[in-house]
Amino acid sequence: MRNRVIVVTGASAGIGRATAIECARRGARVALLARQSAGLSAAAAEVERAGGRALAVAVDVADEDAVEAAAERVERELGEIDVWVNNAMATVFGRFVDLRPEEFRRATEVTYHGFVWGTRAALRRMAPRNRGTILQVGSALAYRGIPLQSAYCGAKHAIQGFTESVRTELMHDGVDVRLTMVQLPALNTPQFEWARSRMPRRAQPVPPIYDPSVAARAIVWAAENERRQLYVGWPTFVAIVGDKFAPGLGDAYLARTGFASQQTDEPERLGRPDNLFESVDGLHATRGRFGDRAHERSLQLELSLRRDWLLTAAGAALAALGLSRLR
């Protein structure tokens, strides 16, 4: 990562902010893209303190022209982009029938189209150079939809299909730009404080909850290593694999538990500000309010990052066992 130019969208808070700081610790030059200037400035200051060089660019990723202009500025001020991390998101919690068309449209424009425009801006620069990495921050919900999050699940499913389509086009053309996707579990981010909600009680991540640093480590590792896709956390693994083999069982389980597991016992605060259409002041931070319940490590992730070593060790052990039986 040292001296490499990394672009992170949605970098003013949550996963994006944690990722930008993790890149900075490794000596990267980090461009932080997000809507809110004050939150961006605070995140950029953290990046500088962590040892990286920061460039804060206020941009709404739903605006294709603005994303393209941001990419131009990054290359002009920091240098050629090596890694582009698509992470920005917006959502609204609630039953599908209760969501307004403009809410669904806006969540899709940010969470899905923002990835599309970011990927396009990155490819315009990386493809002619025949190098670079585009990393899509995904979710277990890219495969397994859950109740009360139809807009977000739809966008994440779309990103998964979009990424596979573009990857195969690049392979066909012999372009050596790598697309990878990191599928994340529930994380303790400010999302649950500022997302619009039509649920009766306050939103929460579906337990078990992980600290954003777990996601940041996985994202940076995926940017540095050859992996088509990386699952983070046992819940992500179980959700994705389980949906392949027993989707009906998942439907029944989520219909029974999915409403309560996404809400606390506290009533929703009517009229509170949310960030669906406009930024919310004062909530830009890496972590949300569930720190006492957040896991700072993932055993599944640690095993996944050491997959090649574990397979080699297992192969060696089997070979040794086979030889011992031959003697």
Image (cartoon, rainbow, N blue to C red):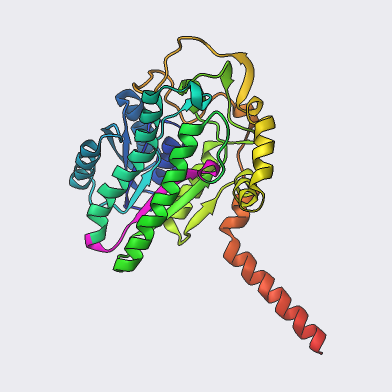
Instruction: Tell me where residue 317 sits by quadrant.
Output: bottom right
Q: Which residues are magenta?
A: 128-142
Q: Looking at the picture, how far across and down is residue 295, in whole percent?
A: 63, 37
- The stretch drawn in magenta includes residue 116: no
Decide: is 174 above or below 232.
Answer: below
Q: Is residue 179 or residue 91 the one in the foreground?
A: 91
Instruction: Tell me where residue 21 sits by quadrant.
Output: top left
Q: Is residue 284 or residue 67 the one in the foreground?
A: 67
On the question of residue 190 being in view, the answer is no
Decide: is 220 above or below 105.
Answer: below
Decide: is 267 above or below 251.
Answer: above
- The stretch drawn in magenta includes residue 134: yes
Q: Looking at the picture, how far across and down is residue 310, in whole percent?
A: 64, 65
What residue sits 62% from the left and 45% below the top? 239
Q: Looking at the picture, how far across and down is residue 82, in whole percent?
A: 31, 54
Query: On the rendered structure, is 320 left or right of 202?
Result: right
